[in-house]
């Protein structure tokens, strides 16, 4: 049976779409890997660092570092390194860090933007939260601060976004028995404050972008076309990587 011109066109289009999907996945993985490498170098030099501030130049999409910060348990922030003041005294290659962040954030669809938020100061700069050493453990901490018996969350990845659909908790009855109880998210009864949702979904997006973390922590719900997944929360005191 001879393929028609239309068949060849359809086949070529299908392979093109597969190639685009593979390219986008590789790009996402590379950008998050850049974020992790930047974070590792910063934490090696400043173990207490929790976030950095930077300027983003829209026209050429260049990143210029401003400073490294830590957030104390009380919630107060402390400037650890001012790029303009301390550039000659730090062991960090600040130009290289800026270049790597520029590469990671050049694509406005990059999952690395999930770690970025506007600075509360009126200086036009942005804040990038350094990812924790163990993203899924941090998600578990955030979830259980509001739902201590949570076992897993259901997350929905649509386009470049993520949202939590529900959480599943162990429901311990007065008679001593136990079962699972799903708690859906709703506008009327949010699962947690908006800032908590932002942090959880940002980390979930980053996990989704790294194949080794996605395979370990996310279980797809339904068919391969579905974008919904279960994220199993580790038990307290464990490390999942």
Image (spheres, rainbow, N blue to C red):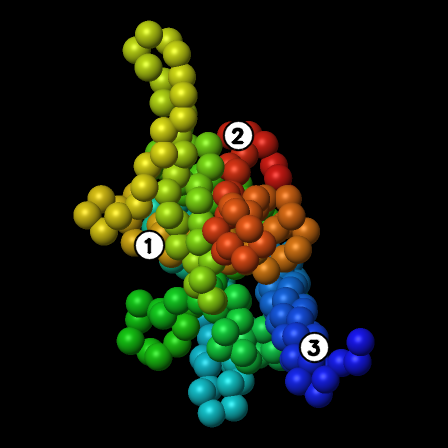
Give the residue furthest to the left: 188
Q: Nearer the viewer, mark 3 or mark 1?
A: 3
Q: Give the residue at x 43% y 58%.
A: 162
Q: Is residue 198 visible?
A: yes
Q: Are marks 2 and 1 in contact (CB under 8 Å)?
A: no
Give the residue furthest to the bottom: 59
Q: Are marks 3 and 2 in contact (CB under 8 Å)?
A: no
**Sequence-earlier tag: 3 or 2:** 3
> Residue 46 is drawn in which quadrant?
bottom right
Q: Give the residue at x 53% y 71%.
A: 110
Residue 52 lies, in percent from the top left, at 48, 66
**Does 237 appear above or below 58?**
above
Mark 2 nearby-residue class (10 Å; few <14, some 14–19, many ≥20): few
**Does 180 appear above or below 13?**
above
Q: Give the residue at x 51% y 85%.
A: 61
Quarter of the rendering occupied by the C terminus: top right
Asked whether, in this view, residue 137 is left or right of residue 156, the answer is right
Secondary structure of residue under mark 1: helix
**Does 125 appear above or below 159?**
below
**Sequence-earlier tag: 2 or 1:** 1
C-alpha separation, residue under disc 3 versus residue under disc 1: 45 Å
Q: Nearer the viewer, residue 6 or 34?
A: 6
Mark 3 nearby-residue class (10 Å; few <14, some 14–19, many ≥20): few
Mark drawn on residue 195? 1
**Does 92 appear above or below 219?**
below
Asked whether, in this view, residue 13 is left or right of residue 222, the answer is right
Residue 220 lies, in percent from the top left, at 55, 47
Mark 1 nearby-residue class (10 Å; few <14, some 14–19, many ≥20): few
Mark drawn on residue 235? 2
Q: Give the residue at x 33% y 78%.
A: 123
C-alpha separation, residue under disc 3 versus residue under disc 2: 47 Å
- Residue at numbered disc 3: 11
């Amino acid at each position: 049976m001879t393929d028609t011109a239309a068949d060849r066109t359809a086949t070529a289009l299908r392979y093109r779409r597969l190639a685009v999907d593979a390219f986008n996945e590789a790009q996402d993985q590379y950008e998050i890997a850049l974020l992790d490498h930047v974070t590792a170098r910063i934490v090696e030099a400043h173990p207490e660092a929790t976030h950095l501030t930077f300027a983003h130049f829209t026209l050429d999409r260049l990143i210029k570092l401003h400073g490294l910060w830590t957030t104390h348990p009380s919630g107060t922030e402390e400037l650890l390194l001012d790029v303009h003041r301390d550039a000659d005294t730090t062991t960090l290659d600040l130009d290289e860090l800026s270049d790597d962040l520029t590469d990671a954030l050049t694509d406005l669809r990059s999952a690395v933007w999930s770690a970025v938020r506007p600075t509360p100061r009126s200086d036009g700069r942005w804040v990038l939260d350094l990812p924790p050493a163990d993203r899924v453990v941090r998600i578990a901490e955030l979830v259980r601060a509001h739902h201590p018996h949570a076992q897993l969350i259901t997350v929905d990845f649509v386009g470049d976004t993520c949202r939590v659909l529900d959480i599943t908790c162990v429901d311990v009855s007065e008679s001593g028995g136990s079962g699972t109880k799903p708690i859906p998210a709703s506008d009327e009864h949010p699962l947690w404050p908006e800032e908590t949702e932002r942090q959880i979904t940002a980390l979930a997006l980053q996990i989704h972008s790294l194949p080794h973390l996605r395979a370990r922590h996310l279980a797809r719900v339904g068919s391969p076309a579905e974008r919904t997944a279960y994220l199993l929360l580790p038990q307290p005191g464990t490390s999942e990587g």
